[in-house]
Image (cartoon, coloured by chain):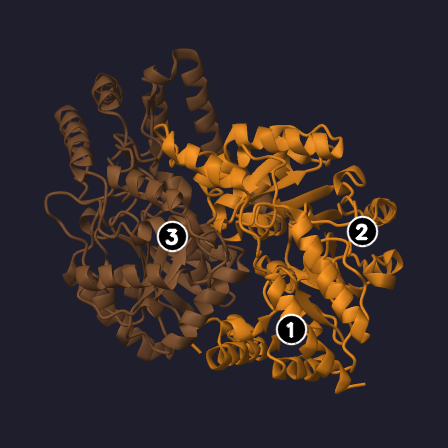
Chain colours: A orange, B brown
């Protein structure tokens, strides 16, 4: 094989996912896009807020010389300051602009963090179900992703994490609100996680980092707020993006913020800046940095997602589907009525409904529905959800 | 050390570069920005062409729904088609849109190529002097950068490359127009390189890729055109960007094009798409993809760089500096009058002139001057260049 063997293996092992996408595309070509109910993608259905469009226009119209030039690898100082000020206000912190690195989305942020801290065969622990890209991200930088089961209702299982910590531990990686479960980890459990990592850092003699991936931080329901990981543990980093806040995932803009109390923080920040450069990101896209710098705290109307959540949860609940109601993000992660959830996902496809099997998230027996879709997709698909379930019960 | 040991080592070993930058910053704080002649950075001094600003405005003003959403990891099909059409025209090829992957600049392009093809300890050969990031890029993906000397006047030394090819060879990486030398490799030598790689692929039983990094492709002088690598060897890939064409390096937009005749091309293209996704780029920034898609063939007025080149070359030549006149890009790479070029670069700093030692490019005994600066910087600095040289001759 001319390409890298590992990449060849990744392509091979993801072929079932590709087959599912191809089947979806086939259904769409037969029945038309509007007659296939696609719950498989996490592409925000809401348009960017008016403020975004207006501010982008004003920035483009009033461009001064050099606005598309290189800037420091960590981003524009004034944008980093705007971010730090916002996060300080939101999370009651005292971060400086130096604690913020602008990145190519949260995905870019997670990769520079892992590049900065991971030595060969270091272990990164994450609770399952988990965002499938984490395995690749850890592997990119020579690390190994270790998954541990979640607790009840997809909450963190601190004992399971403790048991999984070996002398090769480098970080615990969490995702809140969680993709695919919608769980927001409560402050009390983050505090317990922080205590565990303090204890284990002493025991192992290694700095254990806590990395929190929070791209859905602004998308929460029923008044729930995402607690501050940075206040629960000093050696913590948060990665987030504007992809869902502003419905601009194609633009690749986000940031990493390091806890102001992190040990050896100066070296960690240098490592993150270097990683941003040498991984080939160089810097987060210039124009979008300027735009988000002026839109701190602006986000899409979450009540739209809340309405879709109600429609889908109520509809599925009436049929007897079992699930934990999501507290954030725009995913529902119901139990499959049969252990082999791929068989059930195939049955949904017969109803022209596209879903993703839980195996793709390290959680067989479940399936994921993205409800960032038109209301019509939800209402029109419900009878099909009913028919599919009846085949298995 | 809490951060990765390797990254710690990188920070350590680049500390002399940082010291130089700090010294430059110190000089600027004492003498004022205008009184320090900074030839150390490759940040284009020319503003983006008017077409760029106009087209960006019209795209932003006429945004339709979904323009900031996710698209395929490889980029918008219509943009990829526009790129393929342009390259076909320019290089007399028959590439399809499927042969083009939009990337986060040429740096992103090189990283996805190396991720897609590199197994552990594979060797990537590059002629020195070379762009220092190549060493990091190869290492990012488990590869090893092997440098070989250049031939006369910084041309490719085919015999040196042949001698360096081991059974671990995976690719030869070239950069034309070259940073730091300004050399454009002529077609005849690229043909010889292609013949060598065909022969060595047979001998080693491995597909050897030829990767050409061409971010300065549009910046050439005296009517020189950059030959098409893709026409010289089938298993070739070109990475380039709009950073210098359009003076928008902060926006991180470029592409990779694969030779239409590459073997196992389908698998290679899948590997590149996967690499773009899992390295965390996900996709090239959406808005800038649309912009460059409509600006194929548009570039800054190269005659401005040509004028600066003349000013600097004439001035230095009059003092007796020795150099090869650059055929492209915006760098001059003169010989240091003493073997220890860092000592000479320090002497230039005493004249408030900032340059980069050749050691940073694997070529001690030389130093690099970026002439993408205001004309004034060149004219005002010349007396200092004269004085510094006289100290050593």
Which quarter of the figure is the N terminus of chain B placed in?
Answer: top right
Tell me which numbered mark, 2 or 1, is placed earlier along the sequence: 2
Rendered position, B338 above or below A179: above
Which residue is denoted by mark 1 in the rendering? A381
| Residue under the image location 40 percent in, 46 percent down | B132
Q: In the picture provided, is B114 more to the left or to the right than B257?
A: right
x and y percent of residue A273 in the render? 55, 40
Total marks drawn? 3
Q: Chain of mark 1?
A: A
The answer for how far apart the CA atoms under marks 1 and 3 are is 34 Å
Answer whether residue B142 is visible to the viewer in this image. no
Q: Chain of mark 2?
A: A
Rendered position, B1 above or below A359: above
x and y percent of residue B24 in the render? 42, 23
> Considering depth in this image, is A187 or A325 the residue closer to the camera?
A325
How crowded pointer 2 is (Cα within 10 Å; few <14, some 14-19, many 20+) is rated as: many
How crowded pointer 1 is (Cα within 10 Å; few <14, some 14-19, many 20+) is rated as: many
Which residue is denoted by mark 3 in the rendering? B289
x and y percent of residue A146 in the render? 73, 63
Q: Quadrant of residue A360?
A: bottom right
Q: Residue furthest left?
A: B223
The answer for how far apart the CA atoms under marks 2 and 1 are is 31 Å
Q: Quadrant of residue B192?
A: bottom left
């Amino acid at each position: 094989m001319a390409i890298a063997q590992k990449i060849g293996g990744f392509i091979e092992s993801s072929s079932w996912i590709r087959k599912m996408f191809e089947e979806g595309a086939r259904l769409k070509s037969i029945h038309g896009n509007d007659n296939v109910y696609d719950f498989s993608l996490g592409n925000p259905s809401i348009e960017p807020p008016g403020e975004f469009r207006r501010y982008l226009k004003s920035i483009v119209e009033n461009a001064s010389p050099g606005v598309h030039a290189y800037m420091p690898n960590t981003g524009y100082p004034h944008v980093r300051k705007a971010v730090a000020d916002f996060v300080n206000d939101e999370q009651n912190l005292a971060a400086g602009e130096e604690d913020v690195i602008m990145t190519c989305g949260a995905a870019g942020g997670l990769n520079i963090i892992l590049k900065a801290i991971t030595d060969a065969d270091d272990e990164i622990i994450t609770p399952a179900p988990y965002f499938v890209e984490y395995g690749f991200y850890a592997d990119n930088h020579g690390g190994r992703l270790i998954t541990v089961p979640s607790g009840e209702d997809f909450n963190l299982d601190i004992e399971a994490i403790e048991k999984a910590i070996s002398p090769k531990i480098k970080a615990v990686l969490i995702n809140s609100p969680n993709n695919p479960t919608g769980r927001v980890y409560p402050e009390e459990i983050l505090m317990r996680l922080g205590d565990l990592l303090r204890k284990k850092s002493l025991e192992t003699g290694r700095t254990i980092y806590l990395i929190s991936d929070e791209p859905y931080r602004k998308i929460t329901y029923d008044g729930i707020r995402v607690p501050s990981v940075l206040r629960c543990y000093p050696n913590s980093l948060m990665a987030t993006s504007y992809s869902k806040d502003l419905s601009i995932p194609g633009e690749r803009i986000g940031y990493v913020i390091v806890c102001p109390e992190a040990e050896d923080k100066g070296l960690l920040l240098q490592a993150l800046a270097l990683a941003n450069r040498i991984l080939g990101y160089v810097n987060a896209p210039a124009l979008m940095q300027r735009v988000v710098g002026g839109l701190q705290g602006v986000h899409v109307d979450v009540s739209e997602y809340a309405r879709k959540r109600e429609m889908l949860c109520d509809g599925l609940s009436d049929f007897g589907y079992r699930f934990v109601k999501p507290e954030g993000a725009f995913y529902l992660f119901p139990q499959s009525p049969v252990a082999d959830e791929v068989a059930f996902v195939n049955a949904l496809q017969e109803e022209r409904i596209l879903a993703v099997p839980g195996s793709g998230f390290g959680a067989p027996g479940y399936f994921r529905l993205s409800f960032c879709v038109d209301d019509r997709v939800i209402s029109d698909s419900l009878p099909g959800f009913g028919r599919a379930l009846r085949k298995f019960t």
